Image (cartoon, helix red, strand yellow):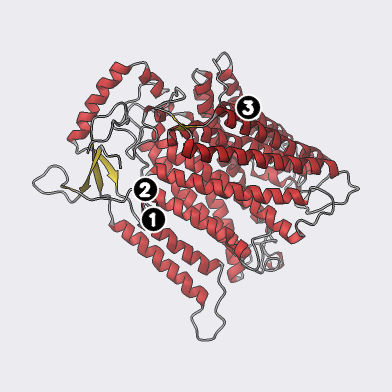
Amino acid sequence: MDATVKSHFIGKEEKSAPRPRLLYRPTAKTGLMSWLTTVDHKRIGFLYGIFALFFFLVGGVEALLIRLQLMVPNNTVLTAEQYNMMFTMHGTTMIFLAVMPLSAAFFNYIMPLQIGARDVAFPRLNAFSLWTFVVGAIIINLGWFMKDGPPDAGWTGYSPLTSRLYNPDHSIDMWVMGLQLLGVASIAASLNFIVTIINLRAPGMTMMRLPVFTWMTLVTAFLIVLSFPAITIALVEVMMDRLFGANFFEVSNGGMPILWQHLFWVFGHPEVYILILPAMGIISEILPTFSRKPLYGYPIVVFSGACIGFLGFTVWSHHMFTTGMGTVATAAFSLATMAIAVPTGVKIFNWIGTLWGGHIQMRTPMLFALGFIWMFMIGGFSGVMHSAAPADAQQQDSYFVIAHFHYVLIGGSIFALLAGIQYWFPLMFGRMVSEFWGKLSFWVIFVGFNVTFFPMHFLGLNGMPRRTFTYDSNLGWNTPNFIATIGALILGVGIGIYFGVMIYTYFKGEKVGQDPWDGRTLEWSIHNPPHEYNFKVVPTVHARDAWWYEKHHKEEIAKEAAEHAKAEAAHGGIHMPFASIWPFVTSFGILIGAIGVSVLDHDPRPGFWGTKIAVSLLGGVVMFLGAYLWALEGNEGYHLHLEEEDGHGSAPAAKH
């Protein structure tokens, strides 16, 4: 806690007092316990980012092993089984444990600041979503430390590869359970973000004054809430098949394997936009800042984002053109797939309009943003090709598809997320990344990415199937595979430079003051790094680019801020929630129960309560005890009484 802040406990209201009785209650601000009990949206966002970046590096190592195996014909770096494990875990890790939580890190950290809020609507639920995500990640990766190894059925988990017949060990059980828990975490966080954006906006911030990144947070949250039930149903059915002998997907007993594909892709294609819409929001913040002009066509950009979210639910079966759905269904999904390219193209033209005529500053975040636009366009062009069912039938499950979705998800999502880290790093940590090293990392990543994935278009057109662990030397695939592997190594070096620079900057980087980019939105109006309370006074928003307006109407804003400060002081200061250990305890109980259900075997000794059941019940008890004690905490918190400060949250020297 900043030394200019006094904290008071909010207890039960006294009958004689119109306001709550104030008592002092210290809370831990440093050490491990402060991180385990935190409910501060910024700390939770930071933790999401750290875990996501760790798994991003894990997924990158898995990708390098895949490429090393395919570098030359008949290679033996990996066996066929190990190769299956590697691409299964690479896809699962990158999508569910890297890109999604890295987007969630920005949602948590940046979105409340952009809308002028002091925290999210449900701070403890936010902490619960973080720790449940960690639990799901642990369960999915436990297989690395077990005899049977991790799952090897592909990240899409197509039936019947997930059945007991083909996968009798626990790896699929852990994959299913881990994904279920990641879904719980995602839905809890998304509901929190929806309520926060709708209810906690600063005065004057209408929906059409929201920053585009906040709008994309809202659309993404709705996509998660609406799409995750489909994959939840599918995973429950797999679990029922495996644990209790149900027959949802077992053909010999009347099951339907294609049912899994429908349920998975009803979730899976909105998932593509869950990954890409946050990236589009980040780009829509960076381009205006470094073009020195407002975003061109703001209402159209917002509307096109909402259209993408809606149309994302209408195109799932373009992943299934080769399953024999029939001409009517194929034609319908082809048309829908073509249609979804329209709002995506609209965004690109609006970004170009933002650049056109602007005073462009080619800083590192801008380079990554421009790289995103170019790479995403290439991925989009090949995606439109797949809307034609005859072309898709030829390219289905070939390396052309691998090239397509990596241009969308790395050239798109990852480039934008790396741009976002560079852009908001000074806000989060008060230090500026070196332009030389930042630009060097961009060019190495850019070159490595294109050298890796562009040759895969030709590999696919030449017939190389995906999910194959080796190939003969007479098939014509040798040179493109060798080039792709060299590119992957270059890409790995670029990522290493990027994160090495980030780590160095965190400890030794140049310190910068408030608003180093001359930004346009409210997060740049506060002290960096932000105080726990974010804003000394909740701002009143007068324009779409709220901070830009404030910088040009200082007298008007200062007068309003003084009036709001008096009003808050009269109400007892700034109300902040207490830290709580119970979300962590609840998630820890889920971890114990998940290990019992998905990892342990029944104890074979007769008359003995099996270890599997005992551990599962223990986890359930810990979970419900944590949730019960969490509920007993109520909504109590503490008040902050601030000394005089400059701006919305720039504190002067500490007073003792």
Inter-mark Cα distance, 2 to 3: 39 Å
Badge nearest the viewer, 2 or 3 = 2
Q: Secondary structure at mark 2?
A: loop
| Amino acid type at image mark 2 | Val
Q: Identify the mark nearer the N-term, 2 or 3.
A: 2
Q: Which mark is residue 345?
A: 3
Q: Which residue is mark 2?
A: 39
Whether residue 222 can be seen here: no
Query: Is 51 in front, or is 332?
Result: 51
Q: Indicate the position of residue 51 as horizontal and vertical percent values.
A: 51, 49
Give the numbered dot on residue 583.
1
Q: Residue furthest bottom?
A: 607
Q: Amino acid at mark 1?
A: Pro
Task: Determine which quarter of the picture holds residue 340.
Answer: top right
Write the residue at 66% across / 40% down. Answer: 493
Say which label, 1 or 2, has the lower sequence index.
2
Name which residue type carries label 3: Gly
